[in-house]
Image (cartoon, coloured by chain):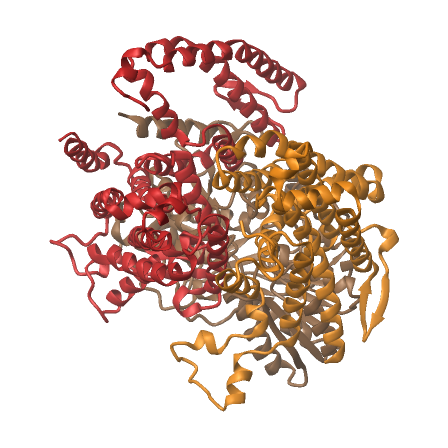
Chain colours: A brown, B red, C orange
Amino acid sequence: MHLMSSATRLLRRHTTALGLCCLLATPAGAQEPIRIAFIDPQSGTFDATGESAYKVLDFAADYFFNSRGGVLGGRPLEVVALDNKASAADSQLQLRRAISEGMQFVVSGQSSAVASALSTTIERHNSRNPESRVLFINYAAVDPLLTGADCSFWHFRFDAHADMKMEVMTSHIAANPDIRRVYVIGQDYSFGQAVGTAAVTMLAAKRPDIQIVGNELHPIGQVKDFTPYISKIVSSGADAVITGNWGADMVALGRGITDAGLDVPIYTFYAAHDGITGTLGESGKNRIHVVHNDRANPVLNDVRRDFTLAFKAANPALDVTQPRLVNALMMLVAAMEAAGTTDPYDVALAMEDRRLTTMTGEEIWMRADDHQLFAPLNVSVHTNEGVEFDSDNSGYGLVTRFTVPLEDTIAESSCHMTRPTR
Amino acid sequence: MRTLVLWAVFALLLMVLPLIFDSVLGVSILNQMAIAIVFALSYNLLLGQGGMLSFGHAVYFGLGGFLAVHAMLLTETQTLAIPLVLIPLVGGLCGLVAALFIGSFSTGRAGTVFAMISLGVGELLAASSLILVSFFGGERGVSADRTFAPPFFGVDFAQDVQVYFLAAAWLFVSVLGMYLFTRTPAGRLANAVRDNPERAQFLGYSAQRVRFISFVVAGFFAGIAGGLFAVNYEILTAGNLNAASSGQVLLMAYIGGLGVFIGPIIGAVLLTLINSLFNHYTTLWMLYLGLVFVLTVMFLPRGLTGLLMMHRLPWQQGRLGLLIRPYTLTAIPGAVLVLSLIGLLEMSQRETGPFVYLGIPLAPGSAMSWLALLAVAVIAFVALRRTLPGLRAAWAEATAQSPRSLEKGDAT
Amino acid sequence: MADALIFATLNGLVTGMLLFMLASGVTLIFSMMGVLNFAHASFYMLGAYFAFAISQQIGFWPALLLAPVLVGVLGALVERYGLRHVHKSGQVAELVFTFGLAFLIEEAVQLFWGRATQDFRSPAALDFALFTLFGQDFPAWKGFMLCISVSIFIGLYFALTRTRTGIIIQAAITHPQTVANLGHNVPRLFMVVFGVGSALAGLAGVIAGPVLTTFPGMASMLGSIVFVIVVIGGLGSLTGALVASLLIGLLQSWAIASGLGMADLLALLGVSFPPDHALRDLWRLTLPQVAPLLPYLLLVLMLIFRPSGLFGKRES
């Protein structure tokens, strides 16, 4: 009746096989690997972004660490992809699997809802089972609450949250005297609503003369044809559009705007990569703006250039869509080395207040109060001129026009963290 | 007497399982299985027993779960103090009330109309769940900490294995309850109305009333499953109510087998294992699941238990041994064929680089690997075609009624 | 306001006619065979993907002709080797089979084309604005969509009422046994109707793919709406399907355009509630928010009060 234990053994063997499959031959450490669970959708319709994120993380682990002798005295890093099918319950199951296999680090971020559930689960698990604690690295879930009212000692966020990005976006818009009427449209859930609220408040503070001519929320993932919404945008006389849409909603909205012949700048968070750039193509040129961490073209230093070239060589169909994953990995390893252990409590303490220079040459800082990362924020434009690394092999990509330095992106902390004892 | 022994064995098995599968993952999967079994059995009350195909059964599961998690939340904030062991009952009652309301207008007819209403209601509720944020919590759902409930004989349910015993107890009670229901007149009538509603009505029974009773009981137990989900995962989201969840339970019941009581139990166990473990080996697991499902509907309409039940007659006649050799002769090329096809599909998903399949190193980049697998598949297919007639003949012989059994009046 | 209304009506018409193209296939199939085909929207998706693949090789216009044919053939094969086999296990089994098929097709599409959105565009020849009204362009492609769907309706109407096969099909809707007794090959008729219905779905996919984006979720997005339309219009009636499609298309379009909400209604009644009221979600509801719910609400109401739908000839 040792089904489970033999299954677990089989699991280990296959995990190792899968983990090493696409990569260069790594100098196999006789040492025990440090295993990192990557819990995000790997199947189903959400997989597009999940797959490229996993590949980037996995590649970076080998490129920067395993090929150079490993971590903590020669231990290789191993990234294990665990499919959570974008569901909170499945994320818990995958977390249990990770814990069963002795993993101490969890990386996730595709969905704020899932990240929120994971953060709560990990907090509860760590307090109920102090002998098998795990650390949560959030690389993309931008709900401000995760480092605000719902902050947790075990959660570290490596992306600027929605309010921070809105500050940069609204400053950029405020600096443009030609924009006088702004239309906000977003998906009807916490993130879309947060973007709308922030847009209204922040623009009112920076340019009281700017009129918000529309603040629309549409059902998420349900609108097939945005033309009725576009009609409202047109009749409102807007000269700029703000949206937090992502995925199919972003593609449809972008297409709708260009189909209608509406020639206004569109400010977004996620209008790039994973098929979106390719679909927007010519019609989005110089119109689509993206606010994001991780500087895009032009690439300023060779480390980043070499990494991207190597990644493209190994994965021709994919792009380095989320370099902040690499930043997260680097900071995690730096904290491990500084603490001299993989124990999540010590690593967490070592990560607090840590500064790091990324592969792009930028400096990033993990604030201790709320475990929020601060980094320079960029406003980039979708175009095909001056693009060294394009997206979706389309010839189009993001060119950074405007960068806000780290110090100017710092927002106040609203976190009251209960700090656990050793 | 024999049934009593079976129930005792079932109870014993439930108590012993967490000692065998004692890893964190193992207990977690056992909990998920318990929830799935109750849910699938409740669905079978509708489909298998009552002949009512519902595409919206997850509604009662979800609503029960949401009320349960709100009850847990109220206990957490000390507005109420509901012991955790009663939370599944809260879920069940919510499912019951919802089924009373929705059943009042949807059980008028069976067949396609019922299926369509269930679909409409399901979609309506799933869509509203993102709008009615105070009850459904928006896309983040509603979360509650179960350790704040008043302790049960000193147990605070912080550990998953403690939750397991709570779930196992409710599982036992629910299975027993649903089994007994199928034995009541109402349960028996449900079968009658499924098979021939007109005749049942001529006998004086209202088909609508019978269907309504089944519907409400099914809703109650689905709600209990939802409550168990709330206790185990401490979170409910809109995804628990939607068409995909309803589809999952349909798969469980159908693959397990509709006609027999334990069919959905087998289906639930199998599907839980597939959903939890398979995605670790391959990203194509949903494709395989879909294929298995469609093939089951086409060739095994009575599910896996139906397949097992088919062997009852040969076994009773002592002719089961006849089938062993034909089975092995067909099983080997069959398995090779399936594995080689899976290998081809898996290889198509690996871009370049070495790919170890069942211990054999393959190279997706080289044509040799592809041709080799294809050749193996073709050979296996040819071999299978050779052995299948032998199997058919053996079956015909094994199921041929002998004069002795006909005398005994054993008409199965 | 007037411009928004006009555009909303135009959009509603285009969406409605597209939905009709899908619903017509389901209605035909249901009328003839009593099978509600869950996989119908999947054939729609296959049409879009096939057209995308073909257009990348030999151009869009050949794809417009070839893709529906391919999907139709596939549909006929599904009927011949799948549905017919399952028919003897009962109505429930047929429904479950088509449901499983829908699931399978969605996974198969992801196997062959991956999970990302495909860059399927309308042909350059139709990439201009048909006219501009109040500063907003109406793409020629949408005009083309409208033309095709209207011609389909006219074509179907004539085929069913004026041709011999059409009349036989109409007879088989209400009296399948008699038609078989008269010597017509009813199973083959079934196969043809299923094939034609699927081809219509495929054609809808080719046309809608560039507009509604081609991605693996496109079938589940439209799947349930199509059933709602068929049920509301009346199981078995082509005119009903047309009326219901237009109704749903226009209703959703107007709902979004209006921007009215509970707040307006409450203001009209002079009632107000505090922001943290228990039922605050209801008071904050707006029509655009509930627009996607309206079809399902109509479905449930229709099934309760008039299961045969608006124009239906047959219930189940």
Query: Is B70 positioned to the left or the right of B332 in the image?
Result: left
**Is residue C73 or residue B224 the one in the foreground?**
C73
The quarter in which the C terminus of chain B is drawn is: top left
Horizontal and vertical percent for residue C192? 70, 36
What residue is at 28 percent from the left and 60 percent from the top? B93
Position above or below: C308 against B37: below
Horizontal and vertical percent for residue B46? 37, 47
Horizontal and vertical percent for residue A383? 77, 56
**Is residue C147 or residue C5 the one in the foreground?**
C147
Position above or below: C16 against A237: above
Residue that sits furthest to the right in the current view: C125
Horizontal and vertical percent for residue B397? 40, 10
The image quarter containing residue A195 is bottom right
Residue that sits furthest to the bottom in the current view: C270
Residue that sits furthest to the left in the current view: B153
Query: Is B372 positioned to the left or the right of A346 in the image?
Result: right
Position above or below: C10 against A399: below
Query: What is the tally of numbered marks visible in this picture?
Result: 0
Query: Is B395 positioned to the left or the right of B229 in the image?
Result: right
The quarter in which the N terminus of chain B is drawn is: top left
Residue A300 visible in this rendered orientation of the protein: no
Residue B138 visible in this rendered orientation of the protein: yes
What residue is at 32 percent from the left and 11 percent from the top? B402
**Is residue C255 or residue A112 the one in the foreground?**
C255
